[in-house]
Image (cartoon, rainbow, N blue to C red):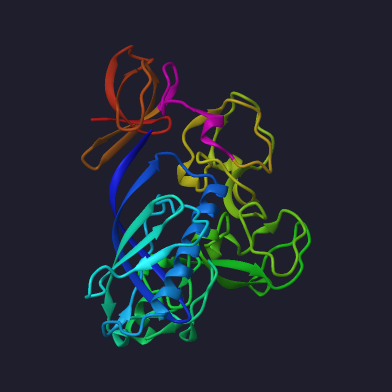
Amino acid sequence: MKGEFFTKINILCSQRGITFYFQGFLFILLVFSSPSSAQETEAQNGFNLLFKQAEIFINSQNTLPEGEPTLIEPDSRIEIPECINGFNFSFPFTSKTSLQASCSSNDWTLFLQVSYLDSDRVATFTKDLEAGSLLSNSDLKNGDLIESVWQGRYIKTSVRSGQRFNEALLDDVVQVYKLTQDINKGDLITPSMFELELLPASIHQNKLHDKNDILNAKALRALATGHQLTRNDLLPLRRVLQVKSPVSRGTLINADMVVLENFWGRVPADVLTDLGQLPHAVATTQLIPGQALRLSQLRTVPAIQKGQVVNVSVDRGQISISTQMIAESSAEIGQRIRLKNNESGKVVEGVVTGIGLATLP
């Protein structure tokens, strides 16, 4: 979809420490689709050429209003045409707050507004910097005015000398960890093997940011000094429940059959990591020592099942009596259950208090 729009633009440019602030109006053709890398490069080249020629014109002027001309980056969708004979510039008004840029070879015209700022109150870059550069005091003029903003930060896009500082140019910082020595596959990672490093957030990719994910992990492969650790490099340490010996399918699991052990590797979300998580359940598959025990490998069963012999307690004041009855139904802990006295044949109702246990009210 294409259309013509009347657009106000802000252009930020600097050469040899001079910054210009251009605002103007232009009919432009916008293509509402993501530009290719080649199109982006062509557009940037067009802006660079316009900025360079605008600088030459400004430097040729004998009188300008007081203050430092300042320039802000324009909308990236604006197209700067190729001008065979070079762009022409002029100040159409005596105030010199508007600049006309035109190209005679294609009848292209851009009206720009120039604003002059107090240079002592504006932070600007003192040199050209590439994207990903870590800022220092020497990179900014009047950087002390905004020290709390830029200190220890990276820039996420390239900037030009003299360009006005803008917080939107800054990248967030994340902490990653890099190796201080070569390690072999299977090595246990200790604190002496790695150190903290700060990186721009836009290029951190799959790096590990939590020190706890690295300590006591095992190397998944051989890694060299200086390598920035990622989740694909290590087998993290986890404490998980495992069976002590092979368990057949259909076997009722109890606490005596499992143990909490170290496990290196990724684990599913349903892995059991504490004895308190072990349900009253039977194995739905063969369980093998050394494997993390998962809930999906178990099928929960009622605390008392129909037909099961139940130990029943009856408390009457200071007297407590225990007997055995047969469950007439299945129930979980806390639920009511029908119990049959085999000697009298009488059926009573009790409450399940544990696995195979119940009490009469």
Q: Quadrant of residue 56?
A: bottom left
Per the rendered image, the range of residues in magenta is: 293-310
Q: Quadrant of the N terminus?
A: top left
Residue 202 x/y as whole percent: 50, 59
Task: Give the quarter of the image for residue 10.
Answer: bottom left
Number of labelled discs?
0
The answer to whether 169 is drawn above or below residue 250 in the figure is below
Q: Nearer the viewer, residue 324 or 343?
A: 324
Which is nearer the eye, 287 or 10? 10
**Magenta span contains residue 257:** no
User: Does residue 297 appear left or right of residue 154 in this picture?
Assistant: right
Q: What percent of the width, then of the height, locates residue 272?
A: 52, 43
Give the vertical position of 179 relative to 36 (above or below). below
Q: Position of residue 194 (x, y in %)?
A: 65, 71
Question: Left or right: 215 with respect to 315?
Answer: right
Question: Does residue 97 appear to the left or right of 238 in the view shown?
Answer: left
- As for residue 301 lying within the magenta part, the answer is yes
- In the displayed orientation, state which residue is furthest to the top: 345
Percent across and percent down for residue 302 are 42, 26
The quadrant in which the C terminus is found is top left
Q: Which residue is nearer to you in this view: 270 or 86?
A: 86
Q: Quadrant of residue 4?
A: top left
Name the foreground residue: 339 vs 253: 253
